[in-house]
Image (cartoon, helix red, strand yellow):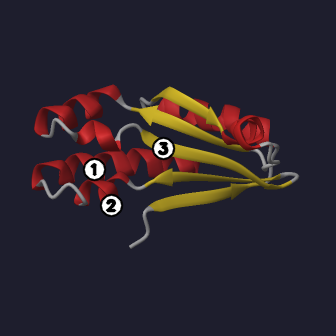
């Protein structure tokens, strides 16, 4: 079972970040966390790494609903979206499939929320 969906963009890394954040905003997501993996690998390990950013996206109404159903669901939140530079002018955007991750919880009440959030994240990726 595939746990993410993605799209390759013919653009710069910085442009992709801006476009992804704006597309997420259009679907009601805010960014709770932003991890610059390249900078962290250099800082912690002294290793070079490609441009790679993890955006922790949250849609508050859906997060609220999920937290009312399952109090430990925060272990799966926020929904991560990655932006990584594959080559100059070639950037991949990938988002977690929340419907798949919600299956691991084993609570059928979360299925509908996962499906709705998946649709919004898929719309974000498709719009890029």
Residue 128 in view of the camera: no
Q: Give whichever of 57, 25 is nearer the camera.
A: 57
Residue 53 coordinates in the image, percent (x, y): 65, 41
Q: Which tag, 1 or 3, sits closer to the chain's start? A: 3
Residue at screen point 59% across, 30% down: 22
Residue at screen point 41% across, 44% down: 120
Residue 95 in view of the camera: yes
127 with respect to 16 (left or right): left
Q: For residue 40, which quarter of the picture?
A: top right
Marks 3/2: CA distance? 13 Å
Residue at screen point 79% across, 50% down: 50
Image depth: mark 1 or mark 3 in front: 3
From the image, tell me which residue sits under label 3. Answer: 80
> In the figure, 31 relative to 102: above or below?
above
Residue 27 coordinates in the image, percent (x, y): 44, 34
| Kind of element beneath mark 2 | helix
Residue at screen point 29% across, 36% down: 74
* Mark 2 in CB contact with mark 1 (< 8 angstroms): yes
Q: Give whichever of 28, 97 is nearer the camera.
A: 97
124 with respect to 91 (left or right): left
Q: Count the marks: how many? A: 3
| Kind of element beneath mark 3 | strand
Q: Which tag, 3 or 2, sits closer to the chain's start? A: 3
Mark seen at residue 100: 2
Which quarter of the rendering shows the N terminus? bottom left
From the image, tell me which residue sits under label 1. Answer: 114
């Amino acid at each position: 079972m595939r746990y993410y969906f993605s799209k390759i963009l013919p653009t710069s890394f910085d442009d992709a970040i801006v476009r992804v954040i704006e597309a997420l905003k259009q679907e009601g997501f805010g960014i709770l966390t932003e991890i610059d993996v390249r900078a962290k690998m250099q800082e912690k390990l002294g290793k070079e790494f490609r441009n790679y950013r993890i955006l922790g996206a949250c849609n508050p109404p859906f997060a609220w609903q999920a937290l009312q159903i399952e109090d430990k669901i925060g272990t799966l939140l926020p929904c991560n979206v990655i932006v990584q530079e594959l080559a100059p002018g070639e950037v991949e955007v990938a988002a977690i499939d929340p419907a798949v991750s919600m299956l691991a919880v084993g609570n059928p009440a979360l299925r509908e929320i996962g499906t709705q959030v998946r649709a919004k994240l898929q719309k974000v990726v498709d719009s890029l």
